[in-house]
Image (cartoon, rainbow, N blue to C red):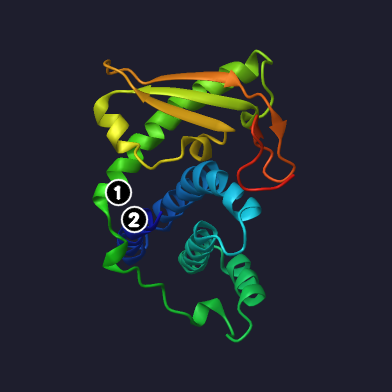
Amino acid sequence: MLHRFHDLNKNFKNYFKSYDFHNLYKELLNFCTVDLSAFYFDIRKDALYCDSKNSEKRKSCIIVLNIILESLLKWLAPILSFTTEEIFTLIIKDKKSIHLESFIKIPKLFENKVLNEKWLELKKIRDICNVSIEAKRASKEIGSSLEANLSISLNKRLFEITENTNFAELCITSDAKIEKNETEEVIAVTTKAEGKKCSVCWKISKNGCERHIT
């Protein structure tokens, strides 16, 4: 997400200098719709709602969300002047107006092309997994994706890319297992999760939730 902000910031400067507010708005809208709403917010709800207050993942997520909020407010201020002003006065009490603020400076440190390439691959695998999950939902075998377990087969290259990636979290399922295969095709198989549903995170497990005592 921080890398995406680094790229967005470069595009924003170019659009803003040329007064191209139409394409500026389109790019920011696409980011909010695709990257934020359909992806980042979706996969981070569990950490925000269900992790403990001392969770490092939860703390990191809140920091990123604050960066996102500040950046978007300032980027959109010339376009949505009254809306951004209202939000700004609600969350920041000691400053007069967002229109007296400077645009946020995105550090070079946020740029990480290697990590970005990795996540492009992870999203492709996630898309294939979601197709498998949606097929089970369409046939009424499961309701929400949390009623599903995933079994994912990947070739060696993709298997190495997915190391230390929790696909249960990424695809919002109760469990996900990854194994290597010898073909280039990504194979995702969805089965109905069995066991007890956690009252906190709603994940289903035979051995009980690892994070919560229910």
Q: Do the residues bearing badges 1 and 2 touch, measured as CB atoms within 8 Å?
A: yes
N-terminal of the two: label 1 or label 2?
Answer: 2
Q: Quadrant of the C terminus?
A: top right
Q: Which residue is mark 1?
A: 115
Label 1, label 2: how far apart the Cα atoms are:
8 Å
- Name which quarter of the figure residue 3 lies in: bottom left
SS under mark 1: helix
| Comparing labels 1 and 2, the label whose residue is closer to the camera | 1
Residue 103 pos. (x, y %): 41, 73
Q: What residue appears at the point 48 percent right and 42 percent down from the top-left corner?
A: 34
Residue 176 pos. (x, y %): 50, 30
Residue type, numbered disc 2:
His
Q: What residue appears at the point 59 percent right and 33 percent down from the top-left corner?
A: 174
SS under mark 2: helix
Q: What residue appears at the point 31 percent right and 18 percent down from the top-left corner?
A: 181
Number of disc labels? 2
Left or right of residue 175: residue 27: left
Q: Which residue is mark 2?
A: 3
Q: What residue appears at the point 36 percent right and 64 percent down from the top-left corner?
A: 16
Where 87 sits versus 45, above or below?
Answer: below
Residue 118 pos. (x, y %): 30, 41
Residue 149 pos. (x, y %): 56, 26
- Name which quarter of the figure residue 83 lies in: bottom right
Residue type, numbered disc 1:
Leu
